[in-house]
Image: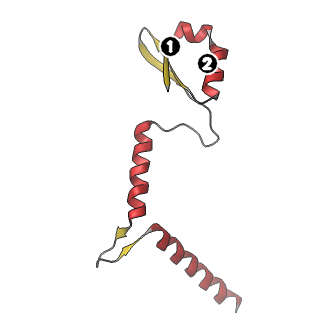
Amino acid sequence: MVTTLSMREANQNFSELARRVEAGEEIVVTRHGKPVLRMVPAQARGRVPTPEQEAAWQRFRDFAESGWTASGGWKFSCDEIYEERLDELERRRNRNKG
């Protein structure tokens, strides 16, 4: 849920707004009716993605899970690439041991 407040309202209720943002709410602060800042929860990984960015990541995840088709018609998934890479690393380790 996004709440929009004026700069004056945000200034007068800052402590309450901080608690609401900590709980996950997004607050947009306006000056003369125009958005000037967005208050979102701080996260260890950085900024919070916008809904458009989340949608783009979901499209990418869906695409990645469906697999890719290489030239020649061979279809492969992310899991297959990962497993192949692990197999290759294991073969190298075994070669270096012996």
- Vertical comparison of 26 with 95: above or below: above
User: As drawn, is 74 to the left or to the right of 31?
Assistant: left
| Residue topped by disc 1 | 5
| Residue topped by disc 2 | 17
User: The disc labelled 1 sits on which kind of residue?
Assistant: Leu
**x and y percentages locating residue 13 in the rendered image:** 62, 11
- Vertical comparison of 50 with 76: above or below: above
Return the residue nearer the eye: 79 or 1: 1
Count residues near mark 2 (Cα–Cα under 10 Å), then give few for <14, some for 14-19, many for 20+. Answer: some
- Vertical comparison of 94 with 72: above or below: below
User: The disc labelled 2 sits on which kind of residue?
Assistant: Leu
**x and y percentages locating residue 85 in the rendered image:** 53, 75
Q: Quadrant of residue 60?
A: bottom left
**x and y percentages locating residue 40 in the rendered image:** 56, 29
Q: CA distance from mark 2 to mark 1?
A: 10 Å
Q: Residue at x 64, y 21 (%)?
A: 18
Element under disc 2: helix
For the residues bearing labels 2 and 1, Cβ distance under 8 angstroms: yes
